[in-house]
Image (cartoon, rainbow, N blue to C red):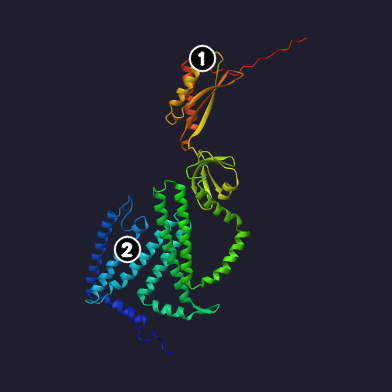
């Protein structure tokens, strides 16, 4: 059997020829052209960052913070290096560019993969592991490429085969399919993360919950399409997924019923908008403001700073009090007791003035003070007022109003009575 690569030089001879190329004087020409490419890439990157308004405080052109900003410089440098290599290949023997091109390709792959993972899963703990994995794979591929061992490694992988059903699969095909699938998933994550950021920042629609629902649905659809393309790239027959789909359906019907119910409930909540991000709700004796609605749970933050993670199914099946569904205003009250000989009209006026002195209290509807009860120790007045920002705290405002009421009553000589009790003494016989 004759090998197809018999005409190719052995990797050791090829590596020796590449190494001897660094001993020629033309290496300085290549280094100068490469330095010129770096300067041009730096200048073009700076101009594009200004034109696209991607300059951010604390970010540099070498690394950036976003996906496009992060890969802009290495992509420009790789493009210019390819052009320079094509121009120099007809003039001088190449040595430096044989190393620079693989290094720049690996750098673009690493930078793109890392930036996409950071944008799509910013708080996931496994992102760092995936970043290191992408880096090791890219640099390993670069070493095999530069050393000339890549064709031999691929040929050896082609010889390792096994049967999967009626088809024969080689290790090379499996690895290439897995890399293609990973690339497709990374591109899908990039597109979905960009669309999600654009939807959440957009003012179209005005409702944050609706835009959150659209971003979740868009990410789910793109991830599904990316998974289908990735499975096709690996070589898996998609018709076999019908059997797998039936098994998954049975699993959801039994073991994953709660999880599926939470996901479906999340889309129902976001679609119906019965609860929106920013609403003040009370569920299971916990009251707070909705800060986020995901596909599985809803995050509620109380005024005291505590956060409750509520499964979406509970918000659908249980009774939930939405304090700001139809009207974001919240009513508060405080009770004051004064002596029976006090001027009722003066007390009511002072209570209203104390409430109006606070800028957070709404003028429309206006606060009101009413004689609510004849207490055992004095007249009880209830001061009621409305606020529109309960997320800024309710106890602090009630305290400020109570302090203002106390100061006003003392200034006008209105008595706040102490509890009074009558003690009957039985005569001793």
What is the tally of numbered marks visible in this picture?
2
Say few, some or many: other residues with alpha carbon within 10 Å of mark 2 (under 14 / 14 to 19 / 20 or more): many
Which of the pair 156/372 is nearer the observer?
372
The residue closer to the viewer here, 177 or 134, is: 177
* Residue under numbered circle 2: 74
Can residue 80 be seen here? Answer: yes
Say which quadrant the C terminus sits in. Answer: top right
Q: Does 289 sit above or below residue 333?
A: below
Pick out the residue farthest to the bottom.
1
Q: Mark 1: give few (<14), some (14-19) or many (20+) Cα within 10 Å.
A: few
Residue 116 percent across, percent down from the top left: 41, 59
Foreground tag (2 vs 1): 1
Q: Is residue 409 left or right of residue 75?
A: right
Q: CA distance from mark 2 to mark 1?
A: 80 Å
- Image side of residue 415 versus residue 90, left or right: right
In the picture, residue 31 is in which quadrant? bottom left
Q: Residue furthest right?
A: 429
Q: Position of residue 230 (x, y in %)?
A: 46, 68
Find residue 120 and report its horizontal and vertical position in percent: 44, 57
Note whether 44 is above or below 230 in the view shown. above
Q: Which residue is found at the position 50% from the left and 44% from the top? A: 290
Location of residue 10 by image quarter: bottom left
Kindly identify which residue carries mark 1: 343
Q: Residue at x 42, y 78 (%)?
A: 154
Q: Residue at x 58, y 50 (%)?
A: 313
The tag earlier along the polypeptide, 2 or 1, is 2
């Amino acid at each position: 059997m004759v090998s197809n690569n018999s005409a190719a030089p052995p990797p050791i001879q090829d590596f020796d020829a590449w190494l001897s190329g660094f001993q020629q004087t033309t290496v300085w020409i290549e280094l100068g052209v490469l330095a010129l490419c770096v300067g041009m890439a730096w200048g073009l990157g700076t101009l594009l960052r200004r034109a696209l308004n991607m300059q951010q405080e604390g970010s540099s052109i070498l690394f950036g913070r976003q996906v496009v900003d992060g890969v802009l410089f290495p992509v420009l440098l790789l493009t210019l290096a390819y052009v320079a290599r094509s121009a120099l290949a007809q003039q001088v023997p190449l040595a430096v560019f044989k190393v620079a091109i693989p290094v720049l390709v690996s750098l673009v792959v690493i930078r793109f993969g890392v930036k996409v993972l950071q944008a799509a899963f910013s708080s996931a703990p496994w992102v760092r592991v995936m970043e290191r994995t992408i880096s090791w794979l890219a640099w390993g591929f670069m070493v095999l490429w530069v050393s000339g061992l890549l064709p031999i490694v691929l040929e050896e992988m082609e010889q390792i085969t096994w049967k999967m059903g009626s088809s024969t699969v080689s290790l090379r095909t499996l690895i290439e399919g897995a890399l293609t699938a990973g690339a497709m998933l990374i591109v899908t994550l990039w597109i979905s993360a960009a669309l999600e950021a654009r939807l959440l920042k957009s003012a179209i629609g005005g409702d944050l919950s609706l835009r959150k629902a659209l971003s979740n649905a868009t990410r789910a659809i793109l991830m599904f399409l990316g998974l289908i393309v990735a499975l096709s790239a690996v070589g898996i027959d998609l018709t076999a997924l019908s059997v797998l789909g039936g098994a998954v359906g049975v699993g959801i019907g039994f073991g994953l019923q709660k999880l599926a119910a939470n996901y479906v409930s999340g889309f129902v909540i976001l679609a119906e908008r019965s609860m929106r991000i920013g609403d003040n709700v009370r569920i299971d004796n916990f009251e707070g403001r909705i800060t986020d609605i995901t596909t599985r749970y809803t995050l509620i933050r109380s005024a005291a700073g505590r956060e409750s993670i509520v499964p979406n199914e509970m918000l659908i099946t249980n009774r939930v009090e939405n304090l700001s569904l139809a009207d974001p205003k919240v009513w508060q009250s405080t009770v004051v007791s004064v002596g029976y000989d006090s001027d009722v009209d003066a007390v009511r006026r002072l209570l209203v003035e104390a409430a109006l002195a606070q800028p957070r209290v709404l003028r429309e509807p206006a606060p009101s003070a009413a004689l609510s009860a004849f207490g055992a120790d004095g007249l009880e007045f209830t001061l009621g007022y409305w606020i529109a920002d309960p997320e800024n705290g309710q106890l602090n405002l009630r305290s400020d109003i109570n302090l203002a009421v106390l100061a006003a009553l003392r200034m006008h000589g209105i008595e706040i009575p102490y509890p009074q009790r009558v003690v009957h003494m039985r005569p001793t016989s």
